[in-house]
Amino acid sequence: MPETPDEDLLLEQAGSGDTQAIASVFESYRERLRRTVKLRMHPQLQARLDASDVLQDTFFEFARRLPDFTQQRPMPLFAWLRRLTIQQLDQLQRKHLGAEKRTAFREIALVASPSQDASVVNLATQLAGQFTSVDRNLLKAEVQSKLFEALSHMEEDEREIIAMRHFEELSTQEIAEILGLTRSGVLKRYTRAIRRLRLCILDDSSNAPY
Amino acid sequence: MTSEDSHSGASIEHDLIDELADEYVSRQQAGEAPLISEYCAKYPELAAEIRDLFPMLSVLERAKSDLLTADTKPTPPPDRVGGYELIREIGRGGMGVIYEARHTAVDRRVALKILPQRLSSDPRSLARFEREARAIAGIHHTNVVPLFEFGRDQEHYFLVMQLIDGVSVDKLIQRLPNESKQVSLQSIAMQLAAESPSCEFDQDASGNERDNNGIRDVPATRATNTSITNRYRQIAGIGNQIASALAYAHKRGIIHRDVKPSNMIYDRHGVAWLTDFGLAKTDDEDLTQTGDFLGTLRYTAPERFRGECDGRSDLYALGLSLYELLALRPAFEASDRLQLVRSIERGSPAKLSSIDPHIPRDLETIVCKAIEHVPDARYESAADMAGDLLNFLSDQPIRARKMPMSEKLRRWRRRNQSLANALALLILLSILTIVGAVAASFREAGLRNQAVDALSIANSSRQALQQTLYFAEMNLAAEAILKSGIPRVSDLLQHWTPREGLPEMRGWEWYFLNALCNRHERIFTPAERVLRFHAVSWSPDGERAALAQDNGDVSVWNVSAGSLAHTLESPHAAVLSLDWSPDGRFLAVGYRQHTLSIWDTETWEVSREYQQPQGEVLGVRWSPNSKHVAFGNGNDLYVAELAGDAMPSRIGEEAEIFSITSIQWSPDGTHLFAGNWWQNRGGLWNLAQGQRVRDIPGWFVRFSDGQPDIALWISSDTTGRLQVWDDKSERPLNTLLGHTASVRCLEWSPDGNLLLSGSDDRSLRIWNAQTFQLQDELLGHPNQVYAATWSPDGKRILSVGEQRAALLWQCDEGTLATLGTLTTRTQCIDWHPHGNSLAVIGRDGAVHIWDLADGAKRHVLTDYPMAAESVRWSPSGMKLATADRPGSVRIWDAEDYTCLRSIQAHDMEAIAVAWSRDEKWLASSGGDKKLFIWDLERNERNHKMQLMHGARCLAWNRGGDVLAAGCDDGSIEIWDQEVGAIVGRFKAHDLPVEDLSWSPDGTSLVSCSTDDLAKVWSMPDGIQQIQLMGHSGPVWNVDWSPSGQRIASSSRDGSVRIWDPITGSQVMALSSIRRSGEFWSVRWSPSGKQIAAGTSTGEVNLWDATRGYAETQAGE
């Protein structure tokens, strides 16, 4: 999603310290960022941490760093915001899980999710809920474990693409920018991943789950 | 992007379908509802693939956006919710309406909060509600309102909490300006609770304590005694309790974020409770929705406008709440939000001392430190603040210091610089609120599903609920035992005696608490018309005891047999005091009707009687040589000489100003000290001069050895605080904190090493007479304790009070008693299989054997050159195995403690040893990363394994064919003895595995680690079943109880915790009575009735539930 001229203007105003503009820019991405957070939050922490906490931290960081960003524009706005969000989430998660467990999380890179495990579990849970609400014959636990397995065995970037495309609602172009791939490369991986996922669900059940 | 984009080459169809899929998803995300058939018609050559692929895409989209449409029409509150009958509304907040409710099956009154309908259709609020529940469920603290349950009944989501009998602190603040400072906060709270039953918490089922005005009778003497200073102390007490609750929560990573007076409840016992955990977040939307934004903003720490928030922000809010309690007005007042923020940003509120000059300086300093503008200038932690408030309460120097002026100026400048920035951000925040509230609604399908799942699971089974409730109440009971006393604990215990519809759920913790409630050995119950005993005295040989009855008789008992020996009937009303003469010949008895009688203990006849025209005889004491008896009649002190016929002489001419309740003779018999516990006064009389020579602001003394000089004296107040004063310097030496109500009796043990105190708080406490540390608590009196006294040998205690029984206690076998003190750390403990001795390693490297049956006699394994690392009894109890730092593994004879065998096993230190059940194999591991299996029958090495990482702990299963080894890298290796190889290996922890224990049935294994966790694994597959989460420091030891029902763990955080292995719930936390250091080791006794735990300070704590099991058997 390229930044519209309107947004460009708004961003300029925001960068020069127009507080209302800052809030409006952030607000327009708030829901997508919330999904990013929800999807990637470590299941253990969901009781302690709320997406709003992370977003609030992100917002203040965003307001602080915005002037620098508008001058340099090193990457698309959303990609940058998303990265900020993941950084804030990661910081909070580390704080909560304790420094000793740092090894459990990968060091944060531009691309990597702070907790791959978390996104798999969360993805599987959400998907499983969907399947079972559609088809009562499928036991939720069964579906969930199948999905979990399928997602675990998937290439990491394929799984990331599904998460970004559907749960964070990123366009294939945005995903390509974030992952450093061509758009067609993203598209190929995406459909391949979907096919795999489908096969895994249909594996030994003759009923289509949809 | 359109589907017309195409690329050359063979993959063109693939590229097209990729593009189509992408377009399909984009259209859905844009809010369209594209038809699959439309795509099939347009691209027939791809139709098959489209039909395959696209439905999956829709499913993925729906997984995110599926939303149940909620019924939004308002409905009246239900009569019943999930097994609770709603009685009436008692409170209302943005996040729910609070009702008083009754659990119909268990018949208990609770506070039940229902999420309002408009919010229960909002996934965000649901999630918040659920999070509140989870947050509180993890907090077991006496000052946090405990959660019993959360669940859903049809469309109602609800939380069930303990019903607190008190008022919220904001209501207290509103009332205080109209009240005299002489009146205690407690009585104001009770009055308030009585006045407004409809909006705040009313009395619980035991509310019969009230009279018709709703105010409990406060004895006049106490009310006048409550000085203005007491008001400040009570406020500091509230601060201390809330700060310790916050410390507890912060340690668990939970920040309250909405500490304010309306979230604190003050109950009729003077206990402060913190509520509404996890409810309010800084998230602006919610605050505006609840309409209590200003209410919350007033207590918001300045850094939170900058988006920073940690535990210190809670301290700021607590500080402001205390400020308001002291000043009786808010620190910052403003009618609108911006103005308020501006004044918070500007900083310091008016000086407390300028508002009320009586506020103690130290207390003001503490509050000032808590509300420092910059977080770094505040207390570092809630524990620090709680500690400093305690310092204030115990009259110790506080740690907080006033800031010098220069520093103040510097801060002021800095602050004003940041003001502009902060205001800018605040404006942002306001805008965010409006935009965000609209944007955020109804869009979190996944979140909602999760919340619904969690709630329905919680709802799924009644038994699971009961179990949750059981665990919550056991934690509560363990916390309550020191603060609320036995009756509350007994109540909680009684909820769980099995009956129709309530299956057996009790575990060790229940029996342990039951043992604590029943520590007394024998109960002497008198004739029916007796309601209470006022005094008690032992015969000098310790065989008999005399009890003063309120019907005017004295009963004399054979203590060992527990039988009534004599009843000394008299025509007088109530016996108030008595004392057995040191030579055993006479019993002096003081009556309410100004009479003292001397009974001959051979004939049991009155040999002498002294009567005064008025007064009552509350105190009597024989001189050390048995020749004189001193007694107080009303305000006057008399001494009677037994020889001759002279009438007793009054000592001192003037009428004295206090009633005499206790008398002490100086060791040389020349002086008398008399005191009064409720007036907290005393005086010293010189018998030769016949007059009072000193006045003392206390009522109990210790004389210097053999001298008539007072060495120290003790004073008390109505809050149960005792203070020890040095007589020479007249400065306080020590403050004895523990009792929560007036202390009526004090007595030094016969050897002078201990001090016994009995209190209205229904407890007896034993203090070290040198250090004045609390040594033991005796709990079991259902009401006030009036008198308690040591047996002549100092091994037993008899106590009486407001009940129809006298209790006899053994004080050398206390449930909480420690076995003694080793010179160094006790890092390893093992029980003899017969349960009669303990092997303990100190850091001195010696292995100490404690014979429990034989009065904890100690053996030390000799000819032992260097530090032992591990010691294990053989399963038959005939031998001991040790591993030591020089690398040897030794086997010892358990009869005479000689070394039978010594193997130089490891190149580096030997760390662990383990016997197989049949004593055929002994496994050892060492720092050389080797694992050996020794064949003890053939005296040879059976196997040798080089491990990847060193194994710190070893455990054979019951069959003796599988050995688990916990390794330094956090993995667990499984050795199969029949195969003779490592057959399994799984990663258990991120940090080294410190200890392992098999479940008795061999199907599970529990491990613990420096990563603060213990985990239960199903064996042999090594799948994690549950995590035991709660320790806030490395877990050193875990042990599965012999019954398999519980797991015990010990940790650096200073606690031993008991867990349910199925649900992973914490059932109880135990701490050292001296609150000393970390727990290095913990082991269940073979009977499963006792737990021994070693601390870093070298004590072994023994928690014994044996009596609790016996009591239950006898009772049922």
Image: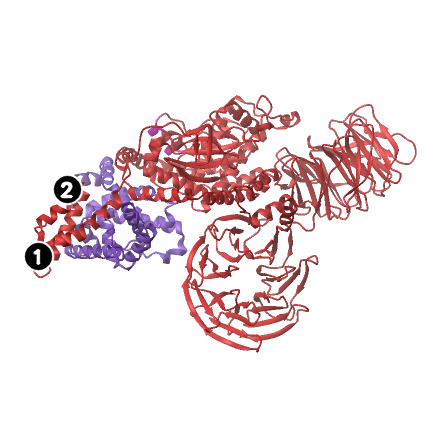
Chain colours: A purple, B red
Label 1, on which residue? B7
Label 2 marks which chain's residue?
A
Q: Quadrant of the C terminus of chain B?
A: top right
Residue at which label 2 appears: A4
Residue B695 visible from this viewpoint: no
Rendered location of residue B800, percent (x, y): 71, 38
Q: Which residues are magenta?
A: B336-347
Secondary structure category for the residue under label 1: loop
Residue B1075 in view: yes
Amino acid type, residue under disc 1 in the picture? His
* Alpha carbon distance from label 2 to label 1: 28 Å
Task: Answer with left or right where residue B194 lies relative to residue B671.
Answer: left
- Where residue B1101 appears, x then y in whole percent? 61, 53
Amino acid, disc 2: Thr
x and y, in percent, of residue B904 in the image: 55, 75
Residue B340 belongs to magenta span: yes
Left or right: B33 in relation to B994: left
Residue B69: % across, % down:
28, 36
The numbered mark 1 sits on a residue in which chain?
Answer: B
